[in-house]
Image (cartoon, grey):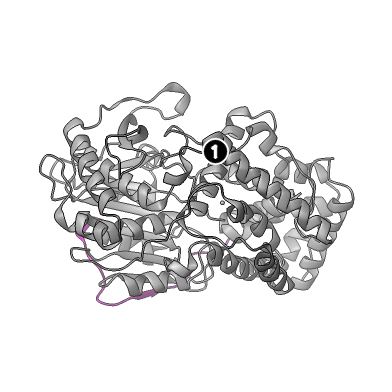
Amino acid sequence: MYSQWRGQADLRHTVAKSRLWALGSAGALVTATLIAGTVSAPAAVAEARHGTGGAGHGVEIAAARAAKKGIDWQACPDDWGLAKPIQCGWVTVPVDYARPYGKQIRLAVDRAGSTGTPQERQGALVYNPGGPGGSGLSFPRRITGKSALWTKVAKAYDFVGFDPRGVGHSAPISCMDPQEFVKAPKADPVPDTGADKNAQRKLAREYAEGCGERSGAMLPYMTTPNTARDLDVIRAALGERRLNYLGVSYGTYLGAVYGTLFPGHLRRMIVDSVVDPARSNIWYQANLNQDIAFEGRWKDWEDWVASHDADFHLGTTRAAVQDKWLQLRATAKKHPLGGVVGPAELISYFQSAPYYDSSWVPVATTFSKYVAGDTKALVDAAAPDLADTAGNIRAENSNAVYTAVECADAHWPTSWHKWDRDNTRLNRDYPFMTWANAWMNLPCATWPARQHTPVEVRTHRGLPPVLIVQSTRDAATPYPGAVDLHRRFKGSRLITEEGAGSHGVTGLVNPCINDRVDAYLLKGTLDSADVTCAPHATPEP
Protein backbone atom coordinates (compact mmCIF):
# COMPACT_ATOMS: atom_id res chain seq x y z
CA MET A 1 0.00 0.00 0.00
CA TYR A 2 2.17 2.78 -1.29
CA SER A 3 1.28 6.27 -2.35
CA GLN A 4 2.51 9.81 -2.34
CA TRP A 5 0.35 11.82 -4.71
CA ARG A 6 0.98 15.06 -2.85
CA GLY A 7 -1.50 17.62 -4.12
CA GLN A 8 -3.97 14.87 -5.02
CA ALA A 9 -5.33 14.08 -1.59
CA ASP A 10 -8.90 13.59 -2.77
CA LEU A 11 -7.82 11.01 -5.32
CA ARG A 12 -5.62 9.29 -2.75
CA HIS A 13 -8.53 8.92 -0.35
CA THR A 14 -10.81 7.77 -3.19
CA VAL A 15 -8.32 5.10 -4.20
CA ALA A 16 -7.98 3.91 -0.63
CA LYS A 17 -11.71 3.96 0.04
CA SER A 18 -12.65 2.25 -3.16
CA ARG A 19 -9.92 -0.38 -3.05
CA LEU A 20 -11.14 -1.37 0.37
CA TRP A 21 -14.16 -2.75 -1.41
CA ALA A 22 -12.20 -5.95 -1.03
CA LEU A 23 -12.51 -5.49 2.67
CA GLY A 24 -16.18 -5.76 2.76
CA SER A 25 -1.85 2.82 -2.26
CA ALA A 26 12.41 15.25 -10.20
CA GLY A 27 14.27 15.35 -12.57
CA ALA A 28 16.06 14.57 -15.56
CA LEU A 29 19.03 16.30 -16.72
CA VAL A 30 19.70 13.17 -18.56
CA THR A 31 22.94 11.41 -18.92
CA ALA A 32 23.15 8.84 -21.51
CA THR A 33 26.44 8.93 -23.24
CA LEU A 34 24.05 9.59 -26.00
CA ILE A 35 25.10 10.29 -29.49
CA ALA A 36 21.90 10.47 -31.46
CA GLY A 37 20.19 8.97 -28.46
CA THR A 38 21.84 5.60 -28.03
CA VAL A 39 22.24 4.20 -24.54
CA SER A 40 25.76 4.13 -23.16
CA ALA A 41 27.67 0.90 -22.79
CA PRO A 42 27.66 0.93 -18.95
CA ALA A 43 23.87 0.85 -18.99
CA ALA A 44 23.73 -2.11 -21.33
CA VAL A 45 26.33 -3.86 -19.18
CA ALA A 46 24.24 -3.23 -16.07
CA GLU A 47 21.18 -4.66 -17.80
CA ALA A 48 23.19 -7.72 -18.82
CA ARG A 49 24.30 -8.28 -15.22
CA HIS A 50 20.68 -8.57 -14.25
CA GLY A 51 19.84 -11.07 -16.96
CA THR A 52 18.01 -8.49 -19.03
CA GLY A 53 20.41 -8.15 -21.93
CA GLY A 54 17.67 -8.37 -24.54
CA ALA A 55 15.71 -5.65 -22.80
CA GLY A 56 18.89 -3.60 -22.52
CA HIS A 57 19.38 -3.71 -26.28
CA GLY A 58 15.72 -2.78 -26.68
CA VAL A 59 16.27 0.31 -24.53
CA GLU A 60 19.16 1.35 -26.78
CA ILE A 61 16.90 1.13 -29.81
CA ALA A 62 13.93 2.89 -28.17
CA ALA A 63 16.14 5.64 -26.73
CA ALA A 64 17.82 6.28 -30.07
CA ARG A 65 14.42 6.63 -31.74
CA ALA A 66 13.19 8.94 -28.99
CA ALA A 67 16.31 11.12 -29.14
CA LYS A 68 15.89 11.53 -32.89
CA LYS A 69 12.19 12.30 -32.65
CA GLY A 70 12.21 14.46 -29.52
CA ILE A 71 8.95 15.66 -27.98
CA ASP A 72 6.46 17.80 -29.86
CA TRP A 73 5.46 20.12 -27.02
CA GLN A 74 1.98 21.58 -27.35
CA ALA A 75 -0.67 23.16 -25.14
CA CYS A 76 -2.13 20.44 -22.91
CA PRO A 77 -5.57 19.03 -23.73
CA ASP A 78 -8.32 20.99 -21.98
CA ASP A 79 -9.56 18.01 -19.99
CA TRP A 80 -6.12 17.37 -18.49
CA GLY A 81 -6.46 20.41 -16.23
CA LEU A 82 -2.93 21.66 -16.95
CA ALA A 83 -3.02 25.33 -17.85
CA LYS A 84 -0.42 27.28 -19.80
CA PRO A 85 2.51 27.72 -19.63
CA ILE A 86 2.61 23.97 -18.88
CA GLN A 87 3.09 22.04 -22.12
CA CYS A 88 2.29 18.40 -22.89
CA GLY A 89 3.62 15.79 -25.29
CA TRP A 90 4.17 12.11 -25.91
CA VAL A 91 7.04 9.65 -25.80
CA THR A 92 6.69 6.31 -27.57
CA VAL A 93 8.05 3.15 -25.93
CA PRO A 94 7.77 -0.58 -26.65
CA VAL A 95 5.46 -2.62 -24.45
CA ASP A 96 8.15 -5.32 -24.32
CA TYR A 97 11.74 -4.10 -24.47
CA ALA A 98 12.86 -7.54 -25.58
CA ARG A 99 10.83 -6.83 -28.74
CA PRO A 100 11.59 -3.16 -29.42
CA TYR A 101 9.95 -3.23 -32.84
CA GLY A 102 6.79 -4.84 -31.51
CA LYS A 103 3.71 -3.19 -30.02
CA GLN A 104 4.28 0.42 -28.93
CA ILE A 105 2.48 2.64 -26.42
CA ARG A 106 2.61 6.38 -25.84
CA LEU A 107 3.53 7.91 -22.49
CA ALA A 108 2.08 11.30 -21.54
CA VAL A 109 4.67 13.85 -20.40
CA ASP A 110 4.45 17.50 -19.42
CA ARG A 111 6.79 20.31 -18.47
CA ALA A 112 7.09 23.83 -17.17
CA GLY A 113 10.20 25.68 -18.30
CA SER A 114 12.86 26.89 -15.89
CA THR A 115 12.42 30.45 -14.65
CA GLY A 116 16.06 31.50 -14.63
CA THR A 117 18.45 32.74 -17.27
CA PRO A 118 19.89 30.47 -19.95
CA GLN A 119 23.14 30.50 -17.99
CA GLU A 120 21.34 29.24 -14.86
CA ARG A 121 19.56 26.36 -16.58
CA GLN A 122 20.87 22.88 -15.77
CA GLY A 123 18.38 20.73 -17.67
CA ALA A 124 15.19 18.89 -16.75
CA LEU A 125 14.10 17.52 -13.39
CA VAL A 126 11.86 14.45 -13.79
CA TYR A 127 9.50 13.42 -11.00
CA ASN A 128 7.62 10.34 -9.87
CA PRO A 129 5.21 10.73 -6.91
CA GLY A 130 4.79 7.11 -5.96
CA GLY A 131 2.02 4.58 -6.08
CA PRO A 132 2.61 2.44 -8.04
CA GLY A 133 -0.16 4.12 -9.99
CA GLY A 134 0.48 7.78 -9.25
CA SER A 135 0.58 10.41 -11.99
CA GLY A 136 3.44 12.89 -12.01
CA LEU A 137 1.72 15.38 -14.32
CA SER A 138 0.99 17.83 -11.51
CA PHE A 139 4.70 18.33 -10.79
CA PRO A 140 5.20 21.31 -13.18
CA ARG A 141 2.64 23.22 -11.12
CA ARG A 142 5.39 23.65 -8.53
CA ILE A 143 6.85 26.13 -11.01
CA THR A 144 3.67 27.72 -12.33
CA GLY A 145 2.21 27.92 -8.82
CA LYS A 146 5.43 29.52 -7.57
CA SER A 147 5.89 27.02 -4.73
CA ALA A 148 8.16 28.73 -2.24
CA LEU A 149 10.13 25.57 -1.48
CA TRP A 150 11.11 25.12 -5.12
CA THR A 151 11.79 28.71 -6.23
CA LYS A 152 15.58 28.33 -6.38
CA VAL A 153 15.50 24.94 -8.09
CA ALA A 154 12.94 26.24 -10.60
CA LYS A 155 15.49 28.73 -11.89
CA ALA A 156 17.79 25.89 -12.89
CA TYR A 157 15.46 23.15 -14.09
CA ASP A 158 12.49 22.49 -16.29
CA PHE A 159 10.04 20.52 -14.13
CA VAL A 160 8.93 17.40 -16.03
CA GLY A 161 6.17 15.00 -15.02
CA PHE A 162 4.84 11.87 -16.69
CA ASP A 163 2.18 9.23 -16.45
CA PRO A 164 3.98 5.88 -16.09
CA ARG A 165 2.93 3.02 -18.33
CA GLY A 166 -0.63 1.95 -17.58
CA VAL A 167 -1.42 5.17 -15.69
CA GLY A 168 -3.81 7.95 -16.68
CA HIS A 169 -3.13 8.94 -20.28
CA SER A 170 -0.34 6.39 -20.84
CA ALA A 171 -2.14 3.31 -22.19
CA PRO A 172 -4.25 3.03 -19.02
CA ILE A 173 -5.10 -0.39 -17.68
CA SER A 174 -8.24 -1.44 -15.80
CA CYS A 175 -9.34 -4.34 -13.63
CA MET A 176 -13.05 -3.66 -13.11
CA ASP A 177 -15.83 -1.22 -13.86
CA PRO A 178 -14.94 2.06 -12.11
CA GLN A 179 -18.43 2.62 -10.73
CA GLU A 180 -18.50 -0.85 -9.22
CA PHE A 181 -15.00 -0.26 -7.88
CA VAL A 182 -16.03 2.70 -5.74
CA LYS A 183 -19.27 1.37 -4.32
CA ALA A 184 -19.14 1.23 -0.55
CA PRO A 185 -18.84 -2.33 0.80
CA LYS A 186 -19.72 -1.52 4.44
CA ALA A 187 -17.94 -4.72 5.48
CA ASP A 188 -15.36 -4.88 8.24
CA PRO A 189 -11.88 -5.73 6.92
CA VAL A 190 -11.07 -7.49 10.20
CA PRO A 191 -12.58 -10.96 9.80
CA ASP A 192 -14.58 -12.55 12.58
CA THR A 193 -14.89 -16.00 11.06
CA GLY A 194 -13.41 -18.28 8.45
CA ALA A 195 -16.39 -17.47 6.27
CA ASP A 196 -15.42 -13.78 6.37
CA LYS A 197 -11.94 -14.70 5.18
CA ASN A 198 -13.27 -16.91 2.41
CA ALA A 199 -15.50 -14.09 1.20
CA GLN A 200 -12.49 -11.78 0.95
CA ARG A 201 -10.46 -14.46 -0.80
CA LYS A 202 -13.21 -14.76 -3.38
CA LEU A 203 -13.26 -11.01 -3.96
CA ALA A 204 -9.47 -10.93 -4.35
CA ARG A 205 -9.53 -13.81 -6.82
CA GLU A 206 -12.28 -12.16 -8.84
CA TYR A 207 -10.33 -8.91 -8.90
CA ALA A 208 -7.23 -10.69 -10.23
CA GLU A 209 -9.36 -12.41 -12.86
CA GLY A 210 -10.82 -9.05 -13.86
CA CYS A 211 -7.32 -7.65 -14.34
CA GLY A 212 -6.52 -10.54 -16.65
CA GLU A 213 -9.74 -10.17 -18.61
CA ARG A 214 -9.55 -6.39 -19.06
CA SER A 215 -5.79 -5.81 -19.30
CA GLY A 216 -4.14 -9.19 -19.75
CA ALA A 217 -1.95 -8.18 -22.68
CA MET A 218 -0.20 -5.52 -20.59
CA LEU A 219 0.11 -7.35 -17.28
CA PRO A 220 3.42 -9.20 -17.92
CA TYR A 221 5.10 -5.89 -18.77
CA MET A 222 3.76 -3.76 -15.90
CA THR A 223 7.01 -3.94 -13.95
CA THR A 224 9.26 -1.45 -12.22
CA PRO A 225 12.25 -2.36 -14.44
CA ASN A 226 10.16 -1.61 -17.54
CA THR A 227 9.08 1.71 -16.04
CA ALA A 228 12.76 2.45 -15.36
CA ARG A 229 13.48 1.72 -19.02
CA ASP A 230 10.63 4.03 -19.98
CA LEU A 231 12.26 6.69 -17.82
CA ASP A 232 15.48 6.32 -19.76
CA VAL A 233 13.63 6.70 -23.06
CA ILE A 234 11.98 9.86 -21.69
CA ARG A 235 15.47 11.08 -20.82
CA ALA A 236 16.57 10.57 -24.39
CA ALA A 237 13.42 12.20 -25.80
CA LEU A 238 14.10 15.28 -23.66
CA GLY A 239 17.47 15.56 -25.36
CA GLU A 240 19.32 15.15 -22.06
CA ARG A 241 22.60 13.29 -21.65
CA ARG A 242 21.96 12.50 -18.02
CA LEU A 243 18.92 12.30 -15.79
CA ASN A 244 18.06 14.46 -12.79
CA TYR A 245 15.37 12.63 -10.85
CA LEU A 246 13.19 13.17 -7.79
CA GLY A 247 11.26 10.13 -6.58
CA VAL A 248 9.00 9.85 -3.55
CA SER A 249 7.59 6.70 -1.91
CA TYR A 250 7.34 4.00 -4.62
CA GLY A 251 9.19 6.53 -6.79
CA THR A 252 12.26 5.78 -4.66
CA TYR A 253 12.16 2.14 -5.70
CA LEU A 254 11.78 3.20 -9.31
CA GLY A 255 14.83 5.42 -8.81
CA ALA A 256 16.79 2.63 -7.13
CA VAL A 257 16.09 0.29 -10.03
CA TYR A 258 16.94 3.02 -12.56
CA GLY A 259 20.22 3.73 -10.77
CA THR A 260 21.06 0.04 -10.86
CA LEU A 261 20.22 -0.48 -14.53
CA PHE A 262 21.45 2.88 -15.84
CA PRO A 263 24.11 4.14 -13.42
CA GLY A 264 25.97 6.14 -16.05
CA HIS A 265 22.80 7.91 -17.13
CA LEU A 266 22.23 9.67 -13.81
CA ARG A 267 23.40 13.18 -12.98
CA ARG A 268 21.59 13.80 -9.71
CA MET A 269 18.94 11.82 -7.88
CA ILE A 270 16.95 12.50 -4.71
CA VAL A 271 14.89 9.70 -3.19
CA ASP A 272 12.45 10.71 -0.46
CA SER A 273 10.65 8.26 1.89
CA VAL A 274 12.36 5.13 0.75
CA VAL A 275 11.08 1.67 -0.09
CA ASP A 276 13.52 -0.97 1.14
CA PRO A 277 14.82 -2.35 -2.18
CA ALA A 278 15.95 -5.73 -0.83
CA ARG A 279 14.67 -8.55 -3.00
CA SER A 280 13.30 -10.26 0.09
CA ASN A 281 11.21 -7.16 0.81
CA ILE A 282 9.58 -6.72 -2.59
CA TRP A 283 6.59 -6.74 -2.08
CA TYR A 284 4.98 -9.21 0.32
CA GLN A 285 7.26 -8.47 3.26
CA ALA A 286 7.13 -4.73 2.55
CA ASN A 287 3.41 -4.70 3.17
CA LEU A 288 3.76 -6.65 6.42
CA ASN A 289 6.38 -4.16 7.58
CA GLN A 290 3.98 -1.35 6.76
CA ASP A 291 1.40 -2.80 9.12
CA ILE A 292 3.82 -2.49 12.03
CA ALA A 293 4.89 1.03 11.09
CA PHE A 294 1.32 2.23 10.59
CA GLU A 295 0.39 1.10 14.07
CA GLY A 296 3.26 3.12 15.51
CA ARG A 297 2.36 6.28 13.63
CA TRP A 298 -1.34 5.82 14.45
CA LYS A 299 -0.36 5.86 18.11
CA ASP A 300 1.69 9.01 17.51
CA TRP A 301 -1.45 10.67 16.14
CA GLU A 302 -3.55 9.47 19.07
CA ASP A 303 -1.00 10.90 21.49
CA TRP A 304 -1.15 14.22 19.67
CA VAL A 305 -4.97 14.22 19.71
CA ALA A 306 -4.92 13.51 23.45
CA SER A 307 -2.50 16.38 24.02
CA HIS A 308 -5.06 18.69 22.36
CA ASP A 309 -8.11 17.49 24.23
CA ALA A 310 -9.16 21.09 24.80
CA ASP A 311 -9.63 21.37 21.03
CA PHE A 312 -10.97 17.93 20.11
CA HIS A 313 -12.54 16.53 23.28
CA LEU A 314 -11.61 12.98 22.35
CA GLY A 315 -9.80 12.10 25.59
CA THR A 316 -6.67 13.08 27.44
CA THR A 317 -4.82 9.80 26.88
CA ARG A 318 -4.02 7.61 23.91
CA ALA A 319 -6.13 4.85 25.44
CA ALA A 320 -9.15 7.17 25.64
CA VAL A 321 -8.81 8.20 21.99
CA GLN A 322 -8.38 4.57 20.94
CA ASP A 323 -11.49 3.62 22.88
CA LYS A 324 -13.52 6.19 20.95
CA TRP A 325 -12.05 4.87 17.69
CA LEU A 326 -13.10 1.32 18.57
CA GLN A 327 -16.57 2.55 19.53
CA LEU A 328 -16.85 4.30 16.16
CA ARG A 329 -15.79 1.15 14.31
CA ALA A 330 -18.28 -0.98 16.25
CA THR A 331 -21.10 1.46 15.54
CA ALA A 332 -20.31 1.60 11.82
CA LYS A 333 -20.05 -2.19 11.67
CA LYS A 334 -23.50 -2.61 13.19
CA HIS A 335 -25.15 0.23 11.26
CA PRO A 336 -23.08 1.88 8.49
CA LEU A 337 -23.06 5.64 8.98
CA GLY A 338 -25.41 7.29 6.55
CA GLY A 339 -25.95 3.84 5.10
CA VAL A 340 -22.61 4.05 3.27
CA VAL A 341 -19.68 4.31 5.73
CA GLY A 342 -18.67 1.07 7.37
CA PRO A 343 -15.38 0.05 9.02
CA ALA A 344 -13.65 -0.27 5.64
CA GLU A 345 -14.45 3.32 4.71
CA LEU A 346 -13.44 4.50 8.17
CA ILE A 347 -10.03 2.87 7.95
CA SER A 348 -9.36 4.29 4.51
CA TYR A 349 -10.27 7.79 5.69
CA PHE A 350 -8.47 7.68 9.01
CA GLN A 351 -5.31 6.16 7.52
CA SER A 352 -4.45 9.55 6.05
CA ALA A 353 -3.52 10.69 9.58
CA PRO A 354 -0.61 8.24 9.97
CA TYR A 355 0.33 8.90 6.34
CA TYR A 356 0.57 12.69 6.45
CA ASP A 357 0.90 15.27 9.20
CA SER A 358 -1.19 17.59 7.04
CA SER A 359 -4.14 15.29 7.76
CA TRP A 360 -3.78 15.36 11.55
CA VAL A 361 -5.97 18.39 12.14
CA PRO A 362 -8.72 17.70 9.57
CA VAL A 363 -9.12 14.04 10.58
CA ALA A 364 -9.19 14.90 14.28
CA THR A 365 -11.67 17.71 13.63
CA THR A 366 -14.02 15.41 11.71
CA PHE A 367 -13.72 12.75 14.41
CA SER A 368 -14.45 15.35 17.07
CA LYS A 369 -17.55 16.54 15.24
CA TYR A 370 -18.83 12.97 15.04
CA VAL A 371 -18.37 12.41 18.78
CA ALA A 372 -20.19 15.70 19.38
CA GLY A 373 -23.15 14.44 17.35
CA ASP A 374 -22.36 15.58 13.78
CA THR A 375 -22.39 12.36 11.74
CA LYS A 376 -22.76 14.16 8.42
CA ALA A 377 -19.24 15.58 8.51
CA LEU A 378 -17.74 12.11 8.78
CA VAL A 379 -20.02 10.63 6.13
CA ASP A 380 -19.14 13.46 3.73
CA ALA A 381 -15.45 12.89 4.36
CA ALA A 382 -15.36 9.09 4.18
CA ALA A 383 -18.08 8.04 1.75
CA PRO A 384 -17.24 7.45 -1.93
CA ASP A 385 -18.60 9.96 -4.43
CA LEU A 386 -20.44 7.83 -6.96
CA ALA A 387 -21.26 10.92 -9.04
CA ASP A 388 -17.58 11.74 -9.68
CA THR A 389 -17.24 9.64 -12.82
CA ALA A 390 -13.87 11.04 -13.87
CA GLY A 391 -12.45 10.71 -10.37
CA ASN A 392 -13.70 7.15 -10.10
CA ILE A 393 -12.04 6.24 -13.40
CA ARG A 394 -8.75 7.66 -12.12
CA ALA A 395 -9.12 5.84 -8.81
CA GLU A 396 -9.84 2.49 -10.44
CA ASN A 397 -6.96 2.93 -12.87
CA SER A 398 -4.53 3.90 -10.10
CA ASN A 399 -5.45 0.84 -8.08
CA ALA A 400 -5.19 -1.40 -11.13
CA VAL A 401 -1.65 -0.17 -11.75
CA TYR A 402 -0.73 -0.51 -8.08
CA THR A 403 -1.86 -4.12 -8.12
CA ALA A 404 -0.39 -4.95 -11.52
CA VAL A 405 3.08 -3.59 -10.72
CA GLU A 406 3.37 -5.10 -7.25
CA CYS A 407 2.06 -8.46 -8.46
CA ALA A 408 4.35 -8.53 -11.50
CA ASP A 409 7.53 -7.28 -9.81
CA ALA A 410 7.99 -10.33 -7.59
CA HIS A 411 6.81 -13.84 -6.79
CA TRP A 412 4.07 -13.74 -4.14
CA PRO A 413 3.05 -16.53 -1.77
CA THR A 414 0.26 -18.62 -3.22
CA SER A 415 -0.50 -20.49 0.01
CA TRP A 416 -3.51 -19.06 1.84
CA HIS A 417 -2.18 -20.71 4.97
CA LYS A 418 0.85 -18.41 4.88
CA TRP A 419 -1.23 -15.26 4.31
CA ASP A 420 -3.62 -16.26 7.08
CA ARG A 421 -0.88 -17.16 9.54
CA ASP A 422 1.19 -14.01 8.94
CA ASN A 423 -1.69 -11.57 9.06
CA THR A 424 -3.45 -13.21 12.00
CA ARG A 425 -0.19 -12.98 13.96
CA LEU A 426 0.40 -9.33 13.04
CA ASN A 427 -3.18 -8.30 13.67
CA ARG A 428 -2.88 -9.25 17.34
CA ASP A 429 -0.41 -6.42 17.99
CA TYR A 430 -0.87 -4.14 14.96
CA PRO A 431 -4.58 -4.17 14.15
CA PHE A 432 -5.03 -0.74 12.57
CA MET A 433 -4.07 -1.66 8.99
CA THR A 434 -3.09 -5.33 8.91
CA TRP A 435 -6.13 -7.03 7.43
CA ALA A 436 -7.06 -4.06 5.25
CA ASN A 437 -3.59 -4.18 3.72
CA ALA A 438 -3.75 -7.96 3.31
CA TRP A 439 -6.99 -7.86 1.32
CA MET A 440 -5.63 -5.07 -0.88
CA ASN A 441 -2.67 -7.22 -1.91
CA LEU A 442 -4.27 -10.68 -1.92
CA PRO A 443 -4.99 -10.61 -5.69
CA CYS A 444 -1.25 -11.22 -6.11
CA ALA A 445 -1.73 -14.73 -4.68
CA THR A 446 -3.79 -15.73 -7.73
CA TRP A 447 -2.27 -13.36 -10.28
CA PRO A 448 -3.03 -14.41 -13.88
CA ALA A 449 0.26 -13.23 -15.41
CA ARG A 450 3.97 -13.86 -15.05
CA GLN A 451 5.65 -12.75 -11.82
CA HIS A 452 9.29 -11.72 -12.06
CA THR A 453 12.38 -11.74 -9.85
CA PRO A 454 13.17 -8.27 -8.46
CA VAL A 455 16.32 -6.46 -9.54
CA GLU A 456 19.22 -6.73 -7.11
CA VAL A 457 19.72 -3.05 -6.32
CA ARG A 458 23.40 -2.18 -6.00
CA THR A 459 26.11 0.25 -7.06
CA HIS A 460 27.56 -0.10 -10.54
CA ARG A 461 30.29 1.92 -12.19
CA GLY A 462 29.20 5.44 -13.05
CA LEU A 463 26.58 5.88 -10.34
CA PRO A 464 26.81 9.45 -8.96
CA PRO A 465 26.27 10.32 -5.29
CA VAL A 466 22.56 10.00 -4.43
CA LEU A 467 20.74 12.06 -1.80
CA ILE A 468 18.40 10.04 0.45
CA VAL A 469 15.83 11.78 2.68
CA GLN A 470 13.77 9.96 5.30
CA SER A 471 11.78 10.53 8.48
CA THR A 472 12.21 8.00 11.29
CA ARG A 473 8.49 7.48 11.99
CA ASP A 474 7.29 7.09 8.39
CA ALA A 475 4.44 4.57 8.25
CA ALA A 476 4.29 3.81 4.53
CA THR A 477 8.04 3.38 4.00
CA PRO A 478 9.67 2.44 7.31
CA TYR A 479 13.04 4.00 8.12
CA PRO A 480 15.17 0.83 7.68
CA GLY A 481 14.47 1.04 3.94
CA ALA A 482 16.45 4.27 3.67
CA VAL A 483 19.30 2.74 5.64
CA ASP A 484 19.38 -0.27 3.32
CA LEU A 485 19.41 1.81 0.13
CA HIS A 486 22.12 4.01 1.65
CA ARG A 487 24.22 0.89 2.19
CA ARG A 488 23.61 -0.35 -1.34
CA PHE A 489 24.33 2.95 -3.11
CA LYS A 490 27.97 3.71 -2.33
CA GLY A 491 28.74 7.38 -1.90
CA SER A 492 25.14 8.29 -1.10
CA ARG A 493 24.21 10.60 1.76
CA LEU A 494 21.31 10.09 4.15
CA ILE A 495 19.39 12.97 5.71
CA THR A 496 17.32 11.71 8.64
CA GLU A 497 14.42 13.74 9.98
CA GLU A 498 14.49 12.51 13.55
CA GLY A 499 11.17 12.02 15.34
CA ALA A 500 9.01 12.98 12.35
CA GLY A 501 6.77 10.67 10.39
CA SER A 502 5.05 12.46 7.54
CA HIS A 503 5.37 10.53 4.28
CA GLY A 504 7.20 12.71 1.79
CA VAL A 505 9.76 14.98 3.43
CA THR A 506 11.05 17.22 0.65
CA GLY A 507 7.67 18.89 0.26
CA LEU A 508 7.59 20.09 3.88
CA VAL A 509 9.09 23.19 5.44
CA ASN A 510 12.24 22.18 7.29
CA PRO A 511 15.23 24.41 6.44
CA CYS A 512 17.68 21.74 7.60
CA ILE A 513 16.39 19.58 4.74
CA ASN A 514 15.23 22.21 2.24
CA ASP A 515 18.61 23.96 2.11
CA ARG A 516 20.44 20.69 1.50
CA VAL A 517 18.05 19.70 -1.28
CA ASP A 518 18.69 23.05 -2.97
CA ALA A 519 22.47 22.75 -2.54
CA TYR A 520 22.50 19.27 -4.05
CA LEU A 521 20.33 20.09 -7.05
CA LEU A 522 21.91 23.47 -7.75
CA LYS A 523 25.58 22.75 -7.01
CA GLY A 524 25.87 18.99 -6.57
CA THR A 525 26.90 19.65 -2.98
CA LEU A 526 26.58 16.97 -0.31
CA ASP A 527 27.65 17.00 3.32
CA SER A 528 30.83 15.14 4.16
CA ALA A 529 28.79 12.80 6.37
CA ASP A 530 25.18 11.84 6.94
CA VAL A 531 22.98 14.45 8.61
CA THR A 532 20.27 14.24 11.27
CA CYS A 533 17.71 17.06 11.27
CA ALA A 534 15.20 18.01 13.93
CA PRO A 535 11.57 17.36 12.92
CA HIS A 536 9.49 19.89 11.04
CA ALA A 537 6.88 21.82 13.00
CA THR A 538 4.16 19.70 14.61
CA PRO A 539 0.65 20.55 13.36
CA GLU A 540 -1.43 22.79 15.58
CA PRO A 541 -5.24 22.92 15.67
Asked whether 298 or 307 is in front, the reply is 298
Judge from the rendering whether residue 182 lies leftward or rightward of residue 468; answer left or right: right
What residue is disc 1 on? 397
The answer to whether residue 157 is visible is no
List x then y, in percent, for residue 258.
31, 55
Image-based side of 305 in relation to 326, left or right = left
Q: Position of residue 478 (x, y in %)?
A: 51, 68
Evaluate whether residue 376 shows in this view: yes
Q: Quadrant of residue 505?
A: bottom left
Is 39 drawn above or below residue 431 in the view shown?
Answer: above
Q: From which residue to which does the magenta span run?
A: 521-541
**Magenta stretch, overall SS:** loop
The residue furthest right is 334
Residue 63: which quarter of the image?
top left
Residue 43 x/y as whole percent: 21, 56
Q: Is residue 374 left or right of residue 238?
A: right
Amino acid at pointer 1: Asn
Outermost residue on the left side: it is: 35
Instruction: Give me the residue at 20% from left, 59% from top.
Output: 45
Residue 222 on image: x %, y %: 44, 46
Task: Say whether residue 342 is magenta.
Answer: no
Position of residue 209 relative to residue 246, above or below, is above
